[in-house]
Image: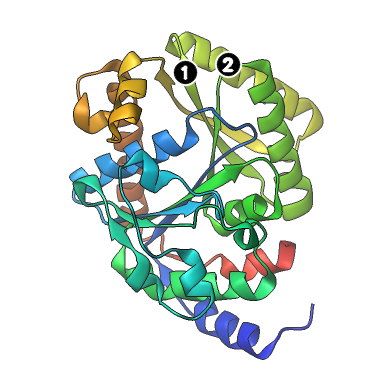
């Protein structure tokens, strides 16, 4: 691909950088599995632990994190891509100190980001990299170009599934597209809405078995589970994180376990001085 002037300048700039920022994509093949709720509640707990977290509502055009948290942002991603505002100017603060980058609700033009728009975003994220410890992409469900772009741009792809067969089928489809078409080889499975850890691990074994057979180049790790809990739907109706309203609920305990695991991993990365270069250049090589 021939680099445009802006692309060449952007990639030269960010290719020099190193990052302590941890970039995680939350994605799913199927909608309705609780992906956004889990990403939001994890972000809340990380903030309460003193971490600086920016969660990007990367379901651009159909964003809804602000609804989940009872917020009404006046600005969104469209204002950044049009050049009217910088990312700093559209970020809003949510419960617990979470910083939220609104993706835009009901904006059809954002449902398929063009090459120039993606460059603008990557340049803005690079500029913000020293301001945050975690950047979390809450992508749309499915296998659209926006989804594959944000999963590829992230260091880690957390795939959210439920025990439903359709959820597993769609998660596998997303893995296949990312692995075969975008050179994404490592995935972490988080199983939501299960009765027990045993059920979650059975879901993982099923998906892992299929992946081993048909995607031998891919690796998939069990990241954890979240049990079915009536407190989750109650918190959605109240537009607050369930870990805030119901800290002793079973689902909250599951997300706390995930938070502790992620923080322990981040500490190990710092202890080993594992500063790594930005991944942004690789994004344009595989898109």
Q: Is residue 265 left or right of residue 285?
A: left
Q: Are marks 1 and 2 in contact (CB under 8 Å)?
A: yes
Q: Is residue 277 above or below residue 73?
A: below
- For image coordinates 70% across by 54% down, the residue present is 145
- For image coordinates 41% across by 34% down, the residue present is 38
Give the secondary structure at mark 2.
loop
- For image coordinates 48% across by 57% down, the residue present is 103
Horizontal and vertical percent position of residue 23: 45, 55
Horizontal and vertical percent position of residue 189: 54, 31
Residue at which label 1 appears: 193
Residue at which label 2 appears: 163
- Mark seen at residue 96: none
Q: In the figure, residue 116 lies in which quadrant?
A: bottom right
Quarter of the picture holding the C terminus: bottom right
Most foreground residue, 183 or 117: 117
Q: Is residue 23 left or right of residue 162?
A: left
Q: Is residue 262 left or right of residue 209?
A: left
Q: How many marks?
A: 2
Q: Is residue 68 above or below residue 112?
A: above
Q: Is residue 81 left or right of residue 170?
A: left
Most foreground residue, 97 or 3: 97
**Residue 69 in sight from this viewpoint:** yes
Quarter of the picture holding the N terminus: bottom right
- For image coordinates 75% across by 44% down, the residue present is 177
Horizontal and vertical percent position of residue 28: 59, 36
Mark 1 or 2, nearer chain start = 2
């Amino acid at each position: 691909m021939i680099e445009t002037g802006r692309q060449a300048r952007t990639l030269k700039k960010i290719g020099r950088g190193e990052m302590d920022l941890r970039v995680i994509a939350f994605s799913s093949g199927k909608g309705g599995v609780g992906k956004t709720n889990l990403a939001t509640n994890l972000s809340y707990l990380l903030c309460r632990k003193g971490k600086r977290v920016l969660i990007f509502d990367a379901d651009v055009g159909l964003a809804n994190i602000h609804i989940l948290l009872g917020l009404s942002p006046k600005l969104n991603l469209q204002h950044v891509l049009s050049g009217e505002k910088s990312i700093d100017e559209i970020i809003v603060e949510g419960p617990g100190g979470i910083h939220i980058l609104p993706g835009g609700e009901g904006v059809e033009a954002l449902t398929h980001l063009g090459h120039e728009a993606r460059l603008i975003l990557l340049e803005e994220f690079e500029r913000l990299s020293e301001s945050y410890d975690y950047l979390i992409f809450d992508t749309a469900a499915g296998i659209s170009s926006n989804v594959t772009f944000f999963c590829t741009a992230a260091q880690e792809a957390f795939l959210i599934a439920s025990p439903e067969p359709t959820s597993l089928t769609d998660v596998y489809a997303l893995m296949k597209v990312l692995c075969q078409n975008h050179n994404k080889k490592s995935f972490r499975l988080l199983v939501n809405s299960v009765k027990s850890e045993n059920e979650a691990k059975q879901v993982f074994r099923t998906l892992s078995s299929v992946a081993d057979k048909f995607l031998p180049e891919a690796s998939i790790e069990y990241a954890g589970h979240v049990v079915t809990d009536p407190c989750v739907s109650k918190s959605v109706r109240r537009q607050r994180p369930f870990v805030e309203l119901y800290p002793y609920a079973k689902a909250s305990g599951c997300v706390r376990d995930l938070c502790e695991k992620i923080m322990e991993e981040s500490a190990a990365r710092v202890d080993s001085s594992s500063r790594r270069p930005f991944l942004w250049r690789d994004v344009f090589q595989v898109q």
